[in-house]
Image: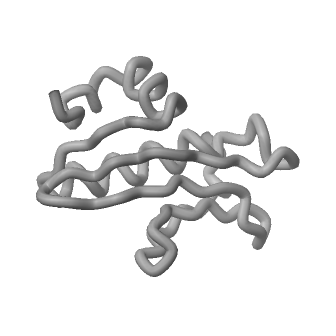
């Protein structure tokens, strides 16, 4: 993951945003309800591909969910795959 990627939660847009080089590099949409956060969609702008944008989004948003005591639903295939590759986050998945 690039240390230059800055991730911010944007509640009004319902997404986490990744910024790189002063530009919006990608985002992960989320929906919250009753102690659960669903991540249905992740986008990385093509010119930022391969620079750790989506991984930064996943790590930051999942760390936030953990800090808030929430479970997650990784509806987005990227999130599901990322969690599979990082089993220390598997406990967050709502079964």
Q: Identify the image quadrant of residue 71.
A: top left
Left or right of residue 45: residue 13: left
Residue 68 at what x, y percent from top left? 17, 60
Q: Quadrant of the C terminus?
A: top left
Q: Give the image location of residue 94, x and y in percent.
A: 18, 34
Q: Is residue 41 above or below residue 33?
A: above
Q: Pick the residue in front: 19 or 13.
A: 13
Question: Which residue is rendered at x = 53% and y = 53% of the image?
Answer: 28
Seen at 37% across and 36% down, the residue is 74
The residue closer to the viewer here, 16 or 13, is: 13
Residue 46's place in the image compared with 22, above or below, is: above
Query: Residue at 51% of width from left, 50% of height from top?
Result: 57
Marks counted in the figure total 0
User: What residue is rendered at 75% in x and 35% in y?
Assistant: 50
Q: Position of residue 55 (x, y in %)?
A: 55, 40
Instruction: Tell me the quarter of the image containing the N terminus.
Output: top right
The colour scheme applied to this rendered structure is: one colour
């Amino acid at each position: 993951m690039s240390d230059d990627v800055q991730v911010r939660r944007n509640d009004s847009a319902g997404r986490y945003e990744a910024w790189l080089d002063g530009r919006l590099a990608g985002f992960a949409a989320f929906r919250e309800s009753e102690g659960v956060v669903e991540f249905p969609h992740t986008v990385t702008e093509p010119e930022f591909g391969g620079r750790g944008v989506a991984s930064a989004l996943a790590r930051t948003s999942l760390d936030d969910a953990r800090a808030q005591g929430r479970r997650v639903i990784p509806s987005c295939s990227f999130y599901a795959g990322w969690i599979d590759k990082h089993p220390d986050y598997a406990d967050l998945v709502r079964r």
